[in-house]
Image (spheres, grey):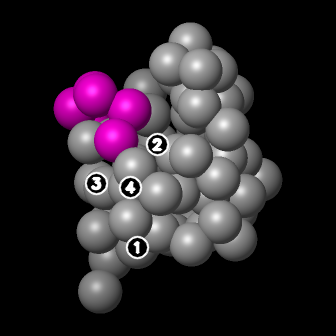
Amino acid sequence: MGYVVMDAERVKELREERGLSKRALAAAAGISVDAARRLEREVPVTFATGRAVADALGVEPSPSLGRVL
């Protein structure tokens, strides 16, 4: 299983641009609220979580969104 560290500032920026709370982002991505909180603290998450968040934010996964570990 692979992991990625999301760029906390970029995730927060995109989330706020879309008017989403962390709870709403979690619901849209199908992840836990704790996982959504970890994103904005740059705690590693699985590729699947990173992909789900990118999809929920309406963007493609890219180096500007996070880095692979």
17 relative to 68, above or below: above
3 relative to 21, above or below: below
The location of residue 56, given as percent across then percent down, is: 34, 41
- Rounded to the nearest whole Å, what is the CA distance between mark 2 and mark 4? 16 Å
- Rounded to the nearest whole Å, what is the CA distance between mark 2 and mark 3? 11 Å
Quick check: marks 2 and 3 in contact, CB under 8 Å?
no
Q: Which residues are magenta?
A: 56-62
- Callout 2 amino acid: Gly
35 relative to 56, above or below: below
- Disc with the residue nearer the chain's start (3 vs 4): 4
What is the crowding at mark 4: few (fewer than 14 residues within 10 Å), some, or many (at least 20)? some
Q: Which residue position is annotated with label 2?
A: 66
The residue drawn where x is 40% and y is 73% is 46
Between 28 and 45, the one lying in front of the other is 28
- Disc with the residue nearer the chain's start (3 vs 1): 1
What is the crowding at mark 2: few (fewer than 14 residues within 10 Å), some, or many (at least 20)? some
Residue 8 can be seen in this image: yes
The reply to whether the magenta stretch includes residue 63 is no
The location of residue 10, given as percent across then percent down, is: 58, 26
Q: Which residue position is annotated with label 4?
A: 29
